[in-house]
Amino acid sequence: MTIAAAPIRVLLADDEGLVRSGFRLLLDVEDDIEVVGEAADGAEAVEQARAARPDVVLMDIRMPKVDGIEATRAIGATPGLQDVRVLILTTYDTDAYVFDGLQAGASGFLLKDAGPAELLHAIRVVAAGEALLAPRITRRLIAQVTASRATNADAAARLDVLTAREREVLALVGRGLSNDEIGAALFLSPATARTHVSHAMVKLGARDRAQLVVIAYQAGIVTP
């Protein structure tokens, strides 16, 4: 007998009740997703994360008391919550915060006006331990935000542990390419590309691909 996988446990954090209700209606009909809590501000999101220990927190940025960036940072710093993935919701007027969200430990971000299919896909991708760095327009906005920031010498020095191939792969991860796209760009199989990504993560102490993106930008090896 095949044992069904446990559903993805999701916490909704948004200060607008109608938004949370809409998300819940969408997610509740999915067999592989379960909403385990709601939070109206960042402080409550941290409390709920500690109590419910969700797989994914769908996190708005602009919330009262504690914003989504600080809440993301607090969740990542809480013992026992290292496996909780944060998917940040952003709008065009808050895209300047996206890079800060990744630095705070978010595993991905999604435009707030994304369609239902995009949202469901994003939750599943992040829950699987991958980083969500789409859509491409948002990646370009990250590039615009980070291009004005000085290269971090310490971050650049960290790359000394990488092989030349791993540096190439890191640069492509920083541009948001998937393993398949990295393989095609470097004439490697997707499995080999995945291996290089994994090696880079281990050597650089990155939890996931999102943290690799941050390192790539800080080290100055990605250009917009």
Image (spheres, rainbow, N blue to C red):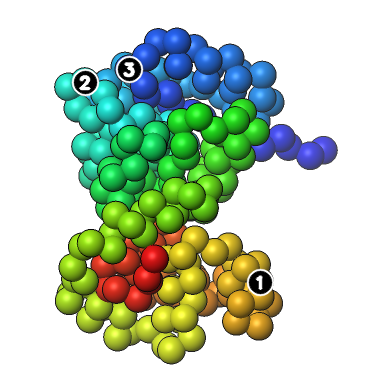
Q: Amino acid at mark 1?
A: Pro
Identify the residue position indicated by label 3 in the image. 15
Q: Position of residue 70 (x, y in %)?
A: 21, 37
Q: CA distance from mark 2 to mark 3?
A: 7 Å
Quadrant placement of the N terminus: top right
Q: Position of residue 175 (x, y in %)?
A: 46, 65
Q: Tell which circle, 2 or 3, labels the residue nearer the N-terminal end.
A: 3
Identify the residue position indicated by label 1 in the image. 190
Residue furthest to the right in view is 1
Identify the residue position indicated by label 2 in the image. 64
- At horizontal 57% and vertical 46% (from top left) the residue drawn is 125
Q: Which of the two marks, 1 or 2, is nearer to us in this view?
A: 2
- At horizontal 31% and vertical 80% (from top left) the residue drawn is 159
In the displayed structure, would residue 11 be above or below residue 165?
above
Q: CA distance from mark 1 to mark 2?
A: 43 Å
Marks 2 and 3 close (CB-CB < 8 Å): yes
Q: CA distance from mark 3 to mark 1?
A: 40 Å
The secondary structure type at the circle numbered 1 is: helix
Q: Amino acid at mark 3?
A: Asp
Mark 2 burial class by Cα count in 10 Å: few <14, some 14-19, many 20+: few
User: Is residue 16 left or right of 30 when viewed as pictured?
Assistant: left
Q: Amino acid at mark 2?
A: Pro
Q: Position of residue 9 (x, y in %)?
A: 51, 30
Identify which residue, 51 or 63, lies in the foreground. Answer: 63
Identify which residue, 21 or 99, lies in the foreground. Answer: 99
- At horizontal 26% and vertical 67% (from top left) the residue drawn is 218
Mark 1 burial class by Cα count in 10 Å: few <14, some 14-19, many 20+: some
User: Is residue 100 left or right of 89 when viewed as pictured?
Assistant: left
Please indicate, yes or no, whether residue 175 appears anywhere in the rendered image: yes
